[in-house]
Amino acid sequence: MLTLMGILAACILFGVPIAFSIAISGTAYLLFESTVPVLVAAQRMVVGVDSFTLLAIPLFLLAGALMAEGDITPRIMRFASSLVGHIPGGMAMVMVVSCMLFGAISGSGVADVAAIGSILLPAMKNQGYKPAFSASLLGCAGSLGTVIPPSIVMVVLGVSMGTSIGKLFLGGVIPGLITGGALMAISYVFARKENYPRLPKADFREVIRSFRGAALPLLTPAIIIGGILQGIFTATEAGGVAAFYALVLSKFVYKKISWTRFFEICLEVAKTSAVVLFIIAAANLFGWVLTVENIPQKIASAILAISSNYWVIIVLFNLLLLVLGMFMETIAIVIILVPIFLPIMQQIGVDPVHLGVMMCVNLAIGANTPPLGVDLITACKVAGIPYEASFRYIYFFIAAMIVSLVLLIAFPPLATYIPNLLMK
C-alpha cells in the first residue's frame, strides 16, 4: 500500500496529470509489489470503460455543447432576468438562476461557467460589477451543474456505487436549489453593500414571453427525468435522447449551427470524453489493486477502530473531500474514494443516494477552492482577470456552499425524500 500511495503522491506533487498519476501508481504496484502479470493493467483499464452506462457521459456532453451553440443561453438568461432581475444585484441573481437552469441541460460545471459567463460577465462589468465578484459568483454558480440533474459526476457515482442514477438525479434537486439560494443570499448582501444596480421589474407579459422563448430548452431536464421515472429509457438512453433533442433545437428550430459546425462539436466532445474516460480507466486499475489487497476493508477497520460514531465518520469523510477537492480533479476523487469508503458508509447506515449527493455538493465546493479550483479558474479566464484576484470574494461564496453542505449532512431527507417518493 505504501508503494501505491507513495508513487501516486509523488506523481501528483511533480505535476503529472492525474490520470497518468493513477495509471503509473497502479502499474508500478503490479511491477514491484505483486506477482500478477503487468498485462493485467491494460486489461483492467479496458474493463473499466467497457460499460453501457458510461456512454451517458459523451452523450450528455454533446447535448450540453449543442445547447450552448444553439442560441439557448440568451433565452435562458432572459427568462431568469424576468424572474429575479428586479432584486438588488439583479444581474448577479440572473447569473445564479441562469447557471441553475443551464446546469439542468449541460450536466457540466465547466460548460455552465463558459456558456453563461461569456454573455453575462461583459454585461455585469458594464453595469459596474467588480470583475472579481462576478467571476467568483460565476465559478460557484456554475458548479451547480455538478449537483443539479442531469449531472455527469452523478453518472460516474452511480456506476461506481452500483446505485440508481435516476435516484441520484432526483436527489440533487433540493440540495441544488438550497445551494443556489445560498449564493443568491450572499449576492444580495454584496449588492446592498457595494450598491450594485437592479434591473427594471418585468411585467407578467414579459415573464410569459421569456418563458415561451426558453420553454423548449427547459424541456430537456423534464424529458430526461420523466423518461427515467416512467421507465421509458435508461440514463444512457436519456443522454442519447437529450443529444438528439439538442440537435433538433439547434439545427432545425433555431437554425444556429451548420452541419460543419456540428461535426466540429462532435470532435470537441470526443476529445473531452476521451480525457474523462481515460481517468475512469486508470482509476479502475487503481481501484482493482486496492480491492485485491483488501485495502478498503483495512481502512474501514482502522477508521471504525477510532470511532464507530455516525457523525464522527461523516464529518471526517467530508473534511477529507474538502481537502482533496483543493488539489484533485472531481471524477478522480470519486473513483478513488468510493471503493474505500462505500463499505464504511454501508456499515454505519448511510443511504447511497445521500452519500452520492453529499459528495456532489462537496466536490462542487472543491471545484472553486484554491489552489485547484477548476470552475473558478475557468471563470477567471472568461472574465479576463488573474486567478488570485477572485480570492477577495470567493471565500464568502464557499462559506455559503458549506452551509448548504452542513444542512444536507444533518438532514439526509433533503437528498432522499424525492427519490424515495417517486422511485421504488
Image (cartoon, rainbow, N blue to C red):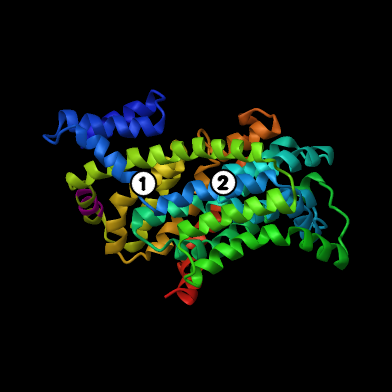
x and y percentages locating residue 224 in the rendered image: 55, 62
Q: Examine the structure image and report whether residue 301 is included in the region drawn in magenta.
A: yes
Measured along the vertical axis of the image, is residue 250 above or below residue 422?
above
Provide the secondary structure element on which disc 1 rests: helix
Q: Is residue 407 left or right of residue 135?
A: left
Q: For the point 18% across and 45% down, which residue is it? A: 292
Q: Is residue 354 left or right of residue 404?
A: left
Question: What span is colored magenta in the figure?
Answer: 298-303
Measured along the vertical axis of the image, is residue 230 above or below residue 323?
below
Q: For the point 59% across and 54% down, which residue is it? A: 244
Measured along the vertical axis of the image, is residue 404 above or below residue 108?
below
Discs 2/1, front: 2
Residue 65, quarter of the rendered image: top right
Whole-angstrom CA distance, mark 2 to mark 1, is 23 Å
Out of 315 and 347, give the one closest to the viewer. Answer: 347
Provide the secondary structure element on which disc 2 rests: helix
Residue at the spot of label 1: 335
Q: For the point 33% across and 34% down, which residue is it? A: 22
